[in-house]
Image (tube, grey):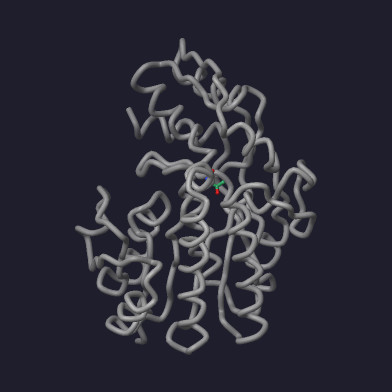
């Protein structure tokens, strides 16, 4: 039987670490090479092949692809929205150059398939806020959003022009008890569960009625594997697919926690991330993903809250 050799770049991050474990379960430990610029604290480098690599170094990435005869690359390395605002030039370099490197390797026939994550950050203040359609006004106002939107355009271009099989999802905020997020605007929805367990109270950096699209990590991993395993002709959108599961405000997540943990208290001290959140949609229409490759979510706010509190306790 033919084996699929996979390289994950950015394997120690929030999505990468869980994705690596899932892909190793599906494709076999030795067929999934995890890589990152540093080892991080996650299990990924202890449970199978691991390589140190700088995603911005074309020769180093090309050497890894060659060494392991890689078929598919999942490019998860990126600076997220809040961190990117603090270092715009570096964020642009990392987010764009790493993408060009894998797109060019695929163009040269050295990789067969690419997964590249986009984000709800591609939308901006002029986008319709509720039930945001797949195709709509996109004027992102953050460095991260600009890099993701440009990346989407390049993915579609490489598909149309060179036949590169690149697949992408616009992730909403992702919530997991296994790996903490790093530098996003939606991170509060993870922090709040940690603080509910340790202190039974939380000070939120967004205001109480800021509604954002969110997803439990198990669903996000299933979506990622799902789009990569879908038949090529079913992937009709080669920029990036809208993807949704739930939307809630800080007040609503606090209420869900209070149902499970009596006495939980939330207070609000919005900071610079409020402006980023205000520029994003509050809910997403993901009917194209559901129709084209059968996307369905499992978790809502209530079931996710139960899982988060049970596992963090
Ligand atoms: C962030 O908050 O920057 C990310 C995202 C929505 O892409 N979680």
- Residue ranking furthest to the bottom: 109
Residue nearest the observer in this picture, 250 or 177:
250
Is 158 displayed left or right of 134 in the figure?
A: left
Residue drawn where x is 76% and y is 42% of the image: 129
Q: Quadrant of residue 230?
A: bottom right
Furthest residue toward top: 263
* Residue 311 x/y as whole percent: 35, 34
Among the 4 quarters of the image, the one containing residue 296: bottom right
Give residue 125's position: percent from left, percent from top.
74, 43
Q: Is residue 163 above or below residue 202?
A: below
Q: Is residue 130 above or below residue 68?
A: above
The quadrant in which the C terminus is found is: top left
Which residue shows up at 26% across the image and 65% down it?
52
Picture coordinates of residue 83, whole percent (x, y)? 47, 44
Looking at the image, the residue that sits furthest to the front is: 89
Query: Could you tell me residue 67's position as x and y percent?
Result: 27, 83
Residue sitting farthest toward the left:
46
**Res 159 → quadrant:** bottom right
């Amino acid at each position: 039987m033919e084996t699929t050799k996979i390289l994950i770049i950015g394997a120690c991050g929030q999505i990468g670490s869980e994705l690596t474990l899932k892909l190793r379960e599906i494709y076999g430990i030795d067929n999934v090479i995890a890589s990152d610029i540093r080892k991080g604290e996650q299990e990924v480098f202890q449970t199978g092949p691991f390589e140190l690599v700088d995603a911005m170094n074309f020769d180093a990435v090309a050497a890894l692809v060659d060494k392991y005869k890689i078929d598919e690359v999942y490019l998860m390395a990126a600076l997220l929205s809040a961190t990117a605002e603090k270092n715009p030039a570096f964020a642009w370099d990392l987010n764009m150059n790493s993408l060009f490197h894998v797109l060019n390797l695929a163009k040269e026939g050295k990789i067969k398939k690419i997964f590249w994550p986009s984000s709800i950050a591609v939308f901006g203040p002029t986008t319709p806020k509720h039930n945001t359609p797949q195709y709509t006004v996109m004027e992102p106002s953050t460095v991260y959003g600009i890099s993701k939107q440009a990346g989407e355009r390049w993915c579609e271009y490489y598909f149309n022009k060179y036949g590169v099989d690149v697949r992408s999802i616009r992730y909403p905020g992702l919530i997991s008890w296994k790996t903490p997020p790093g530098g996003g605007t939606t991170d509060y929805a993870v922090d709040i569960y940690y603080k509910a367990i340790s202190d039974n109270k939380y000070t939120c950096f967004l205001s109480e009625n800021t509604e954002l699209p969110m997803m439990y990590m198990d669903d996000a991993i299933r979506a990622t594997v799902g789009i990569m395993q879908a038949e090529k002709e079913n992937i009709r959108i080669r920029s990036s697919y809208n993807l949704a599961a739930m939307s809630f405000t800080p007040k609503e997540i606090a209420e869900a926690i209070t149902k499970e943990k009596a006495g939980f208290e939330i207070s609000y001290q919005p900071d610079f991330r409020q402006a980023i959140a205000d520029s994003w949609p509050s809910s997403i229409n993901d009917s194209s993903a559901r129709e084209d490759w059968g996307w369905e979510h499992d978790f809502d706010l209530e079931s996710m809250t139960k899982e988060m509190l049970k596992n963090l306790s």
